[in-house]
Amino acid sequence: MCLGSLARGRMGRKPLGERLEELYGLVQWVEDPRSEEGMRKYLEALDRVRKLLEHDWFKKLLESRRRVSVLDVCGGTGIGGVALAKVLDEEGVEVELTALDLRRSALEVASVWGSEELGREVRTVEADARRVHELGLKADVTLLYGFSAPHFDPWDMARLLSSVSEVLSGDGLLAMEETDRRYSIFFLQGYARALAEAASEEGVVASFTSAIM
């Protein structure tokens, strides 16, 4: 079950941004780069971005321009987007960074911390990523960092990718961080079987069988 579906089922008809705020309050996801664990995530992001920029597609994109616009979709507190902007800065590329998310509290962190880290303003937009094409934004690089895919069911993921494609420049790139969730998370991190016993607008009942490692 995607996080978006969980938010819809558990938290009724509140605006999606409010439901996600409540959901993240339950999950306790480490995301504040000002904390020790959050800073560790940011340093990991810097390493990953440096490897990403070695890809031929990024090399080709940067050959034609020394100024790029980056849109960090589902940007949260900005860890991924700021890391990408920081590494591009190191390469002598001027970056205009926009972080987009539905959670205002996360965007406030992205704005303050990101601006301090980069030494310039990080623009933030509180909006639904599935409708980003309606905002009049344009980007050379769109980033979906931090394993954000579970926020979207298959239909919403198609809407997201379609919307993002309208925002990208002609030779723009979408960079998306993903993993084999079934193996690396459910099996290696402790869950061999997951079963939704019941699901309704009132809530979800799920059972998990622990993996034997």
Image (cartoon, grey):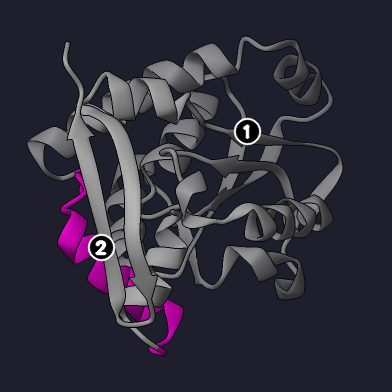
Q: Residue at x 41, y 39 (%)?
A: 146
Q: Position of residue 82 (x, y in %)?
A: 42, 40
User: What residue sits right under mark 1 in the picture?
Assistant: 175
Q: Position of residue 118 (x, y in %)?
A: 38, 42
Extent of the magenta region: 13-33
**CA neighbours of label 2 inside 10 A, class few (<14), some (14 to 19), many (20+):** few
Of 168 and 64, the residue lying toward us = 168
Give the side of residue 213 with respect to residue 154, left or right. Answer: left
Q: Position of residue 83 (x, y in %)?
A: 42, 33
Q: Is residue 89 above or below residue 118?
A: above
Give the side of residue 48 with respect to residue 127, left or right. Answer: left
Please tell me whether residue 122 belongs to the stretch shown in magenta.
Answer: no
Q: Secondary structure at mark 1?
A: strand
Inspect the image, locate mark 1, and give the three-letter code of the amino acid beneath it: Ala
Whether residue 105 is visible here, answered yes or no, is no
Q: Residue at x 44, y 19 (%)?
A: 48
